[in-house]
Image (cartoon, grey):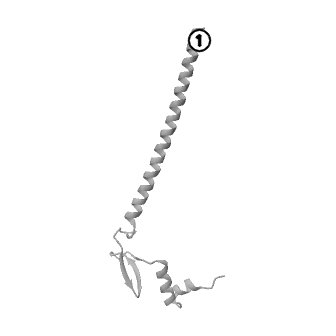
Amino acid sequence: MADEKDRLGDKLRDKERAEEGKFFAERDRAAVEKLRKQAAAADQDRLAELTRNRCPKCGARLQAVEHRGVTVEECPNRHGMWLDTGDWETIANRERDSWLGRLFFRPRL
């Protein structure tokens, strides 16, 4: 009878250890996942900062240039120029009869 009590106590201790192992494994898994998400967010921010104000084709830093009263960002290697929404509206107001003006000021249905 005493031998059976010892086996039962051993089984209970083994079960406690197993439950404890599961608890710590789950806690470690959650901590690692949280660290992965933080690292991914930091990488995304770093990538956004590296590509800000750069030409998407060649990666050169864009230069602010004024064309007809509108300041635009232009690639120094002649790969294009970029305008903000306000710049488009300024040009469209000046060019109401052109295709650009008709695009912005067409009647809404």
Q: Secondary structure at mark 1?
A: helix
Q: Quadrant of residue 106?
A: bottom right
Q: Nearer the viewer, residue 18 or 79?
A: 18
In this view, which residue lies farthest toward the right? 109
Amino acid at circle 1: Glu
Q: Nearer the viewer, residue 98 or 91?
A: 91
Identify the residue at image location x=41%, y=63%: 48
Label 1: how many Cα within 10 Å (few below 14, some 14–19, many 20+): few
Asked if residue 39 is positioned above or below residue 108 in the image, the reply reads above
Asked if residue 22 is positioned above or below residue 83 in the image, the reply reads above
**Residue 7 x/y as whole percent:** 56, 14
**Residue 31 x/y as whole percent:** 47, 43
Q: Quadrant of residue 53?
A: bottom left
**Residue 55 x/y as whole percent:** 38, 70
Identify the residue at image location x=50%, y=83%: 89
Instruction: Report the quarter where the N terminus lies.
Output: top right
Instruction: Report the quarter where the C terminus lies.
Output: bottom right
Asked if residue 69 is positioned above or below residue 40 in the image, the reply reads below
Identify the residue at image location x=46%, y=43%: 32
Read off the residue under disc 1: 4
Identify the residue at image location x=45%, y=48%: 36
